[in-house]
Amino acid sequence: MSATAFTTRPELLGTFGMVATTHWLASAAGMAVLEAGGNAYDAAVAAGFVLHVVEPHLNGVGGDMPAICHDAKTGRTFVVCGQGTAPAAATPQAYAAQGVDAIPGTGLLAATVPGSFGAWLLMLERYGTLGLRDVLGYAIGYARDGYPLVRQAADTIAAVAPVFAEHWQASAQIYTPGGQAPAPRSRFANPMLADTLTRLVAEGEAVGSTREAQIEGARRAFYSGFVAEEIDAFAATEQWDSDGTHRGLLTGADLDGWRAGEEDPVVADFAGIQVAKTQAWGQGPVLLQQLRILEQFDLASMGPGSADLVHTVVESAKLAFADREAFYGDPDHVDVPIDELISPGYAAERARLVGPTADTALRPGSPAGRSARLPQAVLAAMADGGAWPDGLATPPAPGQGEPTVARGDTCHLDVVDRWGNVVSATPSGGWLQSSPTIPGLGFALGTRAQMFWLEPGLASSLAPGTRPRTTLSPSLLLRDGRPYLSFGTPGGDQQDQWTVPFLINHLVFGMDLQAAIDAPTWHSTHGPSSFAPRAAEPLGVRAETRLGADVLAELRRRGHDVSDAGPWSLGRISAAGIRADGMLMAAANPRGMQGYAVGR
């Protein structure tokens, strides 16, 4: 990449610390923690809780959060799993008893154990240096005193205000006071959430004098104390969702029996770098599968953003995501053939299926001789597209029956400190528009259970105590076992698609981080969505205009159903890392005008 090439912002370089997130207030809070002497774990927790407050349409305290971390002291790279499990009462029979044949994308029936809070506290207790009050103070301040509400949040609140008014009164109390949705960039506060976080800190501090005891005390106040009690009582009430009115299945006992944990990542090589992802309870390995397939091609000869490159990447994605549908699930409960799925031999076999034109089918392979089984709903969606042709849970126009609620999205953060600690985290769920606010707590439960199948015998079928096969997908690159780069993006099923051209741009074409993020991007909508109503768009490709009219025309000639998504619309990647010379670096996405990287 030429040093004079235009980018929307510079790639940041420094020696002290770097924070990159999807919201400038979270990035600033994380940097403030680094300046105060905290490490990357302290900064990540502070930034993460700020994201819970200032992007309530994208994540919340009641949601979920996986992270991939590298610890400088021990040299370990590990995953923190903040993905909560299905309730003990969650069985297909329990849903059938309530007249439900597919878990809805909204409301209490879709709730799993909230995982974000426990995951952040695990990270802080084991690897941080500061107290809970020190890192939560930023989020509490914004929740109590207010922050500028981004336009997307304001638009989301306005869109679901009728649901709040008619069905979810506690949500209306916070988000539409006086019956009015807040204006974009107006000062907005959630004092109820501020009170909850303040009480959690206070109850933790009352337990003991040490930092660790106080953090554990706050964790118990959430999972076994007043928060769990409020969730238990509220989940037992009937609440509206997109399929009717139902009670939830989550109980206080489910929270009490769950803890965030650590586990090893799945790792595969690409372009001389090791890429670390979560296990197959998340979709993370699908990135590794794509990269393994793409290594079978001469990507460097294709050129960045060329029709050859886009076609090859899209067809490879379709193959990898087909395997995700057939084989991914909670490896604590099902046997996922992960070693074979990411093996070079299997990748070579799959690469031979990439032809000169777009393939119309969803084609899982046979890793380790396994027979692939796709859900019946997936087969139906591939046949007719499913509920909506755009693959999203789009609410009907006012007056067209009972309103549905648009699904939420996700946040991301990356932190690296001067000691060599690195954190990549993707908080999500607990969206204000997807589940009613819990009275007295100020946050909503997550709806991740919508990613389970009620059809039995599948890799991701519902069972009590299992993790849903989530889309959340933080990433970490290592060079010779040493941390090189953390990165990630919101985007549901697109998370492990948008990062593919980013990595190719950076590792193959030599672009710096900001140029690789700024470059025009694309994704396939060929396979079924992971979110209710599980729609699909066979042959679909979304592409940014900046790829060029000739490229889009050539993709259509090859059989892709290309939608021009506009010039700056796809991908919200952020990244932070350590160069070979020890210099720290970071960059963040300009699309949407809210993600920022900071550092020095």
Image (cartoon, rainbow, N blue to C red):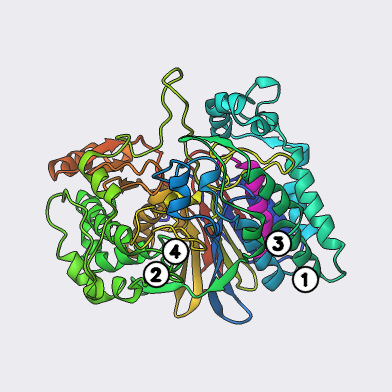
Residue kind at label 2, given as amino acid type: Val
User: Residue beneath label 2, please?
Assistant: 334
Whether the magenta-drawn stretch holds residue 594 is answered as no
Under circle 3, the secondary element is helix
- Which one is in front in this view, the residue at disc 1 or the one at disc 3? 1
User: Residue beneath label 4, please?
Assistant: 281
> Of callouts 3 and 2, which one flags the residue occurring earlier in the amino acid sequence?
3
- Of residues 248 and 27, the one drawn nearer to the viewer in this rendering: 248
Say how many tags the image has. 4
Q: Position of residue 113 (x, y in %)?
A: 59, 56
What is the quadrant of the C terminus in the image?
A: bottom right
**Real-space Cα distance between discs 3 and 2?**
41 Å
User: Residue beneath label 1, please?
Assistant: 212
User: Residue beneath label 3, please?
Assistant: 34
Residue kind at label 4, given as amino acid type: Trp
From the viewer's perspective, tell me whether residue 68 is left or right of residue 598. left
The magenta-colored residue range is 39-57
Q: Where is residue 307 in the image (x, y as percent from the top left)?
A: 21, 49
- Is the Cβ of the residue at disc 1 closer than 8 Å to that at disc 3? no
Q: Residue at x 75, y 67 (%)?
A: 216
Residue kind at label 3, given as amino acid type: Leu
